[in-house]
Every structure is written in C-alpha cells, then in structure tokens.
C-alpha cells in the first residue's frame, strides 16, 4: 500500500479546470465497497495519469449500507479527477451505471467493477483497441478467479446462451471492464438488469464490437453480490433483448402474425362446425366450439395489440426525435477546380 502511495504521488497530474471537458471517463458503480475503495482509486490514478490523457473518475455509490459514501467523500477531497455520485438508495447495478454515464463527460468511457477484481492496468489496452475503429471493446476474463460452481458454471452457460440468442459472439458478457464511445452510450437506454447485455444492445445500434483478454483478480475485501439466482433473471432479460433485437421497430410482425394465425384457425373451425350444424348435428356441447370462439377472440386481441404496439413505437421515436437508424459517418464529395 505504501509503495502504491509513493508511486501515485510521483505521477500526480495537473487538475482539470472546471470548464475543461475530459477525454476519458471511468465509470465505477459501487455497493458496500468501503474497504476496496481507497486502493481502487490509487490503482486507477496510477494506471491513468501516465497516459497523458485528461480523465475523470465517476464513482457511483448505489445506496451502500456501509461507509462507502463517507470514504468516497474523503477520496473526492484528495483527488481532483474524482466525481462522486451518491444515489439515495440501492437501485441496482444497471441504474448505477446509467447514473455514471449521465454524470460523465468524456469522449471515451470505460466501466469496471469496484471490487478490485478488474485490473485498471488493462484500461490502456482497451483504449488502444477502441482507437482502431471499434465502438465497444469488451474484456474477457480468460482466467477467472471465482468459485467454480456458484460463479463459473452459471456464467459459461449464460454466455453461451446469450451469444446464441443475440448473435453477438463474446466469451464473457459478464465482464464489467468495457470501453465505449460516448455516441454509442447516448444511443442506449438502460433499465431493469440490462447492464450485462450492453454488447447486445450496442449490436442493435449497429456498433462495431471487439473483445480482448484481461486480467482477473480474486476478491480481496467484502463478499460477492452475485449468486446463482441471478441466472434466472438473466433468462428473463435475455427474452427482452431478443425481442428488442428482432421486433423493436416492427412489433406488428410478431403480434400481427400470431393474431392472423389464431383468427385463421378460428375461422376454419367455425366453418367446419357450421357445416356440421347445417348437416343436422348438434354442436352446442362440442369442445371444438369453445376452441373456435377462443381462437377468434385471441386472434382479434393479438392483432389489436400489434396495432397498439406499432402506434406506441411511432410515438416513442417521434416524441423523442429518435430516428430508427444510426449513421456512422457521412461523406460528401467536393468539387475540384
């Protein structure tokens, strides 16, 4: 710890003026990390100050029940690059990350966990890859220091399932160490528990995505906030991302098709029962009559739901001035004399 402090003092940078905008923002959500926080700040400053880039550390306390907020205030008093965001209560990692994105100002944004398991020394490598033209660079913890049953096995299953469903082939969706371009972050709306699906959401926005191997350390302080129960939440969120990827701008395709299919089945059954009735047979006590009626009602409801979804999506895009496309670059020819 003493060695870190002495090296940290030798690489101390000139503070940013209040009017300047940093080139790089580091966003770190925190929850009950009072012991890890001082060492985390020192490691981040050691890794970033020698780069020669202007930067800020946006540390978000997600309603911690320990002394994380107090330690964060102390650290902010001694580090001019630090921006402390204190949430009123515990909202979850996705909300904390969104709060950090909103508070950040850098052209490039890097996220990582606050438990010291991600290595800040890997940040320059992510930035180099980002400068090659990618919009998002995701870390891959190829040598994870976690429990095999409670963490590694569910993670491998989830990663394979997410990659298969979303079409974004990454080895490690759960790694918080990622680098983004600001324009990409501004295009993504975070809610629920979608922070682990950021590469998939970025892919929906047309982002170029790369993956690099990063270091992973065993937890030094506190307890892990994740359990095997998170796997079930991942499955629910995965369905949401799949639907957004396939039908976000055309919900009528799924609801309208289902509605027309149900109405078609109901119409065929009704025609058959009508023919039977005209033949003199009794149909009032047949279960098939109930199936036909339910199919017709369900079909009408699904079709109407699809129409309402289309109207809602149009209202969403038009009210926010949000186009249904994303432009990477516009090139205009010039007349030469």
Image (cartoon, rainbow, N blue to C red):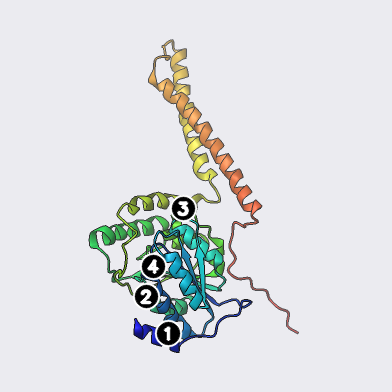
For mark 1, give the secondary structure: helix
| Tag 1 residue | 8
From the top left corner, tell me how far across and down residue 124 is, in percent: 44, 80
| Mark 3 vs 4, N-terminal side | 4
Q: In which quarter of the image is residue 282?
A: top left
Asked if one can make out residue 187 in the rendered structure from this viewpoint, the answer is: yes
| Mark 4 vs 2, N-terminal side | 4
Q: In this view, does 130 lie above or below 190?
A: below
For mark 4, give the secondary structure: loop
- Residue at x-position 50% and y-position 63%: 86
Q: In which quarter of the image is residue 31?
A: bottom left
Gap in Å between the C-alphas at discs 2 and 3? Answer: 27 Å
Labels 2, 1: front one: 1
| Mark 4 vs 1, N-terminal side | 1
Out of 77 and 117, give the one closest to the viewer: 77
Out of 273 and 154, give the one closest to the viewer: 154
Asked if the residues shown at circle 2 and circle 1 are in contact, with their CB atoms under 8 angstroms apart, the answer is no
Out of 154 and 267, give the one closest to the viewer: 154
Out of 260 and 17, give the one closest to the viewer: 17
Image side of residue 150 versus residue 251, left or right:
left
For mark 3, give the secondary structure: loop
| Tag 3 residue | 192
Mark carried by residue 34:
4
Asked if one can make out residue 209 in the rendered structure from this viewpoint, the answer is: no
Q: Within 10 angstroms of label 4, few (less than 14), some, or many (20 or more) residues?
A: many
| Tag 2 residue | 119
Gap in Å between the C-alphas at discs 4 and 1? Answer: 20 Å
């Amino acid at each position: 710890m003493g060695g870190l402090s002495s090296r940290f003092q030798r690489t101390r940078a000139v503070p940013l003026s209040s009017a300047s905008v940093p080139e790089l923002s580091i966003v770190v959500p925190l929850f009950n990390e009072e012991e890890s926080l001082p060492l985390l700040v020192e490691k981040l400053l050691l890794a970033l100050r020698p780069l020669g880039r202007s930067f800020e550390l946006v540390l978000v306390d997600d309603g911690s029940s320990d002394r994380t907020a107090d330690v964060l205030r102390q650290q902010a008093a001694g580090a001019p690059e630090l921006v402390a965001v204190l949430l009123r209560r515990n909202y979850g990692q996705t909300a904390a990350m969104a709060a950090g994105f909103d508070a950040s100002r850098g052209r490039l944004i890097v996220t990582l966990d606050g438990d010291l398991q991600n290595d800040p020394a890997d940040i320059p490598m992510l930035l180099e890859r980002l400068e090659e033209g990618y919009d998002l660079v995701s870390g891959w913890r190829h040598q994870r220091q976690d429990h095999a049953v409670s963490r590694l096995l569910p993670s491998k299953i989830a990663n394979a399932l997410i990659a298969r469903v979303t079409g974004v082939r990454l080895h490690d969706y759960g790694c918080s160490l990622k680098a983004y371009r600001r324009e990409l972050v501004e295009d993504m709306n975070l809610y629920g528990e979608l922070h682990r699906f950021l590469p998939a959401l970025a892919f929906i926005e047309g982002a170029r995505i790369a993956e690099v191997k990063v270091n992973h350390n065993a937890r030094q302080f506190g307890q892990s906030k994740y359990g095997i129960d998170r796997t079930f939440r991942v499955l629910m969120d995965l369905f949401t991302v799949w639907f957004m990827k396939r039908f976000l701008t055309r919900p009528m395709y799924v609801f309208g098709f289902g509605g027309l299919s149900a109405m078609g089945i109901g119409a065929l059954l009704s025609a058959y029962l009508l023919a039977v009735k005209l033949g003199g047979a009794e149909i009032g006590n047949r279960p098939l009559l109930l199936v036909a009626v339910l199919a017709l009602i369900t079909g009408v409801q699904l079709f109407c739901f699809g129409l309402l979804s289309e109207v809602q999506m149009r209202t969403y895009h038009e009210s926010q001035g949000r186009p249904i496309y994303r432009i990477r670059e516009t090139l205009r020819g010039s007349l030469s004399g």
